Image (cartoon, coloured by chain):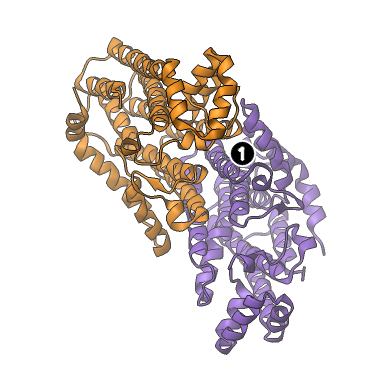
Chain colours: A purple, B orange
Amino acid sequence: MDMTTPIGVWLADELDQVSLVMSDHLKNKHKEVAAICEELAAYKGKMLRPTMLLLSWKSVSSCETTPEAVRVAAGVVELIHLATLVHDDILDESDLRRGAQTINSLFGNEAAVMLGDYLLSSAFLLCSTIKNPELNLLLGGVTNTLCAGELVQLSRRNDMDLDLESYFQIIHDKTASLIAASCEMGAVLGCGSGREIKALKEFGSSVGMAFQIKDDLLDLLGERAIIGKPAGRDLDKGKLTLPIITMLVENPSLKDGFQKIMSDGDRDALSALLHSTGAISSAFDRVSKTVDGAVSGVEEIFENESSKQLCALAKQLKSSV
Amino acid sequence: MDMTTPIGVWLADELDQVSLVMSDHLKNKHKEVAAICEELAAYKGKMLRPTMLLLSWKSVSSCETTPEAVRVAAGVVELIHLATLVHDDILDESDLRRGAQTINSLFGNEAAVMLGDYLLSSAFLLCSTIKNPELNLLLGGVTNTLCAGELVQLSRRNDMDLDLESYFQIIHDKTASLIAASCEMGAVLGCGSGREIKALKEFGSSVGMAFQIKDDLLDLLGERAIIGKPAGRDLDKGKLTLPIITMLVENPSLKDGFQKIMSDGDRDALSALLHSTGAISSAFDRVSKTVDGAVSGVEEIFENESSKQLCALAKQLKSSV
């Protein structure tokens, strides 16, 4: 069952309000800044992080109406995400994002560096308006983790000896940590118990891991139509992802062959090798198992409409595309 | 009278403690992150912003010993400053900073983007540990101003019609705002009155303006030995600064001649033109007057050892180098 539409419809109004919080907050008296911020519309995606924050809040809270602080926090995590996209596009030298031109391709790398900083700063300022010191600490902690994850990934580019543990740590830090923090913030704002907060944070972490493994798989398999950006970018930038690491760990003798394929740029041979060694199906299995673990963790202590929507959202990652 | 040494000696212990707060806070479990942070030692300067914060706190507070929160806040403003240096060096394509290799030249632009983000994030996290919501709001506000200032400056590169008002707004936003916020934070943490906080914030703003005008002058005059980085960088990057704007505003007929000099890259002719039109001495005058205004503002309501040190610090900017 495709749950995109139901969740979308259910939360559409609230997500619109979150978008409004963000656009109001990004208004700037300088027309030059306002102009570049307007181009961010093209970066808008499914708003996964605000969705997870809102659903986590609803899973623990008994309030009928969503308080302003929850919408604001949802805007904060999306602003952090936007900042990482703008800076990632510089790192990846990407010209396209969701089929539209990136900030770096429109305004140059320099403006993209500064816009990313402006978005980071705006997220912290917006978070500060909630005047909940715990949220500020949580946000600062997760952005530190996120940046450290990116730095480690950069330093391990083209490293054929990257092991599974390091890969999982990198994707936890750079991706899963923010999704986990989104769930945690929702649960904290909903005054959840320690056990509830922990369960939702772990759920977010697992969903984030599954999400990144899937994203890496789509990049490797070249599903440009789905990802809205050029495929194969990870390998172009020397980023080894799960299927390749699994293949090299389980078949060390293939390392030379892999390096030859890489220097020849023979993507068809690579794809054949990854499929024949079972590395692709093994990665899809890992996504499924991670999602199953996430779902059972939430089902163990929650049973309400919102927690079911969270689980449905997670299960979408199990589809083959 | 050169007050560098007296202030340095007087505050040396406290500034060492601020440095310790920063280095402790930047410790990271990932050796890759720790390694790149170590290179930041070369970025360490005179710690103007922590100095201004500490002296502002001392100007209003009657406490004998400096509380931890004040040292932490001093570390926060220096971390923000470090983040801007790391990202500025990418924008300016600088290889040298204080005579040492920049992060971008050592590790590449990508790592420098991420390190700057990590420093920004670390500053916000450190500020959050003080658990004073007012400080978080103040910090978020000033970093927004700072990034917006950089974005406006970028968009006005090579703009021969840049007027004085826009130039002053840009240097206020990108430089003076953080120095003003440093003074303001010190005064807020020292529980100063509204009038004291406002006076110290305005003092910081004026000192910041004078500091940036002076810095721009040194770049234009080519005092490489003093600034520790290649001179003439502003013009290379299309940044028009006070002497040039003044000259073009007061002598519009020189615009064509200036553009020819620029396209010929004839720095000697430029220097002669700037001196002969009085644009250089006019900019030095502006530094002096701005400093005098700052000093009289502080002297009007403070009279203690720390406020005198603040004024002495400001007066150093009036020297011709």
Q: Which x, y percent locates residue B78?
A: 37, 39
Foreground residue, A17 or A42?
A42
Q: Looking at the image, which is closer to me, A199 or B56?
A: B56
Task: Tell me if I can see residue A54 in this picture.
Answer: yes
Residue at the bottom extreme? A253
Question: Image quarter for residue A129?
Answer: top right
Q: Is residue A174 above or below residue A130?
A: below
Secondary structure at badge 1 equals: helix
Q: Residue at x 54, y 71 (%)?
A: A158
* Residue at (58% x, 68% y) in the render: A238
Image mark 1: chain: A
Residue for badge 1: A72
Q: Position of residue B270 (x, y in %)?
A: 47, 26
> Which one is nearer the viewer's eye here, B243 or B81?
B243
Q: Amino acid at mark 1?
A: Val
Nearest to the observer: residue A53 or residue B220: B220
Task: Say whether residue B264 is left or right of residue B198.
Answer: right
In the displayed structure, B197 sits above or below A34; it is above
Residue at 62 percent across and 48 percent down: it is A86
